[in-house]
Amino acid sequence: METIKIVSWNVNGVRAVYKKNFMQWLLTDQPHVLCLQETKAQDDQFPAEIAQLDGYTVYFASAQRKGYSGVATLSRLKPKSSQVGMGIEKFDTEGRLLQLDYGGFLLLNIYFPNGKQSNERLQYKMEFYDAFLKYAQNLRRQGKSLIVCGDVNTAHREIDLARPRENAKTSGFLPEERAWINRFLSQGYIDTFRMFTKEGGHYSWWDQRTRARERDIGWRIDYFFVSEDLADKVKSAFIQKDIMG
DNA sequence: TCAGCGCCAAA
DNA sequence: TAGGATGCG
DNA sequence: TTTGGCGCTGACCGCATCCTA
């Protein structure tokens, strides 16, 4: 069986990265599957050149609200089926989950909620976490193998962010958020990045407002998880930190 | 994230 | 339709 | 009286929308 390359990228506005060097990167990197989060575009607002890209089919899960959230998956492989959301209205209207069935595995492209805005949003995030874990476990009971990727919006352990002590009371590194990742992993999922890289200092997100990227004061909040039956099929997992977007 | 502020306890 | 205010991250 | 540590506040950037002139 040949190797499949799957990439996950929180683009923070697909139209913005399209104006930069998105196409150049995509045509060079040529992943089999590309999972985008925070596209901030409805299906019909997607740049046509991406939506009609030769060799790829594009699947969307857009938010109801314009310019907000949204995920999309570009695939060179043909899935057997696709599904938007997990069947829960309050979560599905925010365009956060897109599922493709490739037969041998399900690929779940997810943009987990951000909890920094308010207590209500933190509550919503925790509810999403719980609902997703139930949803995933239900798929497992049906015998499905899962690849789960995207922006989880939580750093797992101290080594996953540059300022653990300072952020112990900040959403994104709260004890209850970290505990959920522990619970998720304990139910039979693998953080693939940690299969290959044990040391800290590897981040996937940096605060724009304080230009934290220049000083590499970051967080690892984007992940590829696989159900443990797939673990021995994972060849590598890495972060392309020099790609902006 | 970080500078700037008030507050307070230790030196 | 350019630009300021607002929402969100 | 000075010093240092803790906790809190607000400005900070970028994408996108909406409203007004």
Image (cartoon, coloured by chain):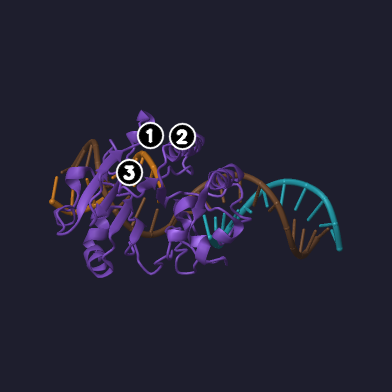
Chain colours: A purple, B cyan, C orange, D brown
Q: Amino acid at mark 2?
A: Ala
First in sequence: mark 2 vs mark 1:
1
| Mark 1 crowd level (few <14, some 14–19, many ≥20, 10 Å Cα) | many
Q: Which residue lies at the image location 37% right of the left edge and 46% below the top edge?
A: A108
User: Which image quarter: residue D20?
Assistant: top left
Callout 2–callout 1 Cβ contact below 8 Å: yes
- From the viewer's side, name the closer residue of A9 and A212: A9
Q: Position of residue A184 (x, y in %)?
A: 53, 44
Q: Is residue A109 left or right of residue D7?
A: left
Label 3 vs label 2: CA separation? 15 Å
| Mark 2, residue position | A131
User: Which image quarter: residue A237?
Assistant: bottom left
Q: Are marks 3 and 2 on the same chain?
A: yes
Label 2 vs label 1: CA separation? 9 Å
| Mark toward the viewer: 1 or 3 | 3
The kind of secondary structure element at disc 1 is helix
Q: Are marks 1 and 3 on the same chain?
A: yes
Q: Which residue lies at the image location 42% right of the left edge and 41% below the top edge?
A: A143
- From the viewer's side, name the closer residue of D7 and A13: A13
First in sequence: mark 3 vs mark 2:
3
Q: Which residue lies at the image location 55% right of the left edge and 59% below the top edge?
A: A160
| Mark 1, residue position | A91
Circle 2 chain: A
| Mark 3, residue position | A99
Q: Quadrant of the N terminus of chain A?
A: bottom left
Extreme residue in the top direction: A89
Q: Amino acid at mark 1?
A: Phe
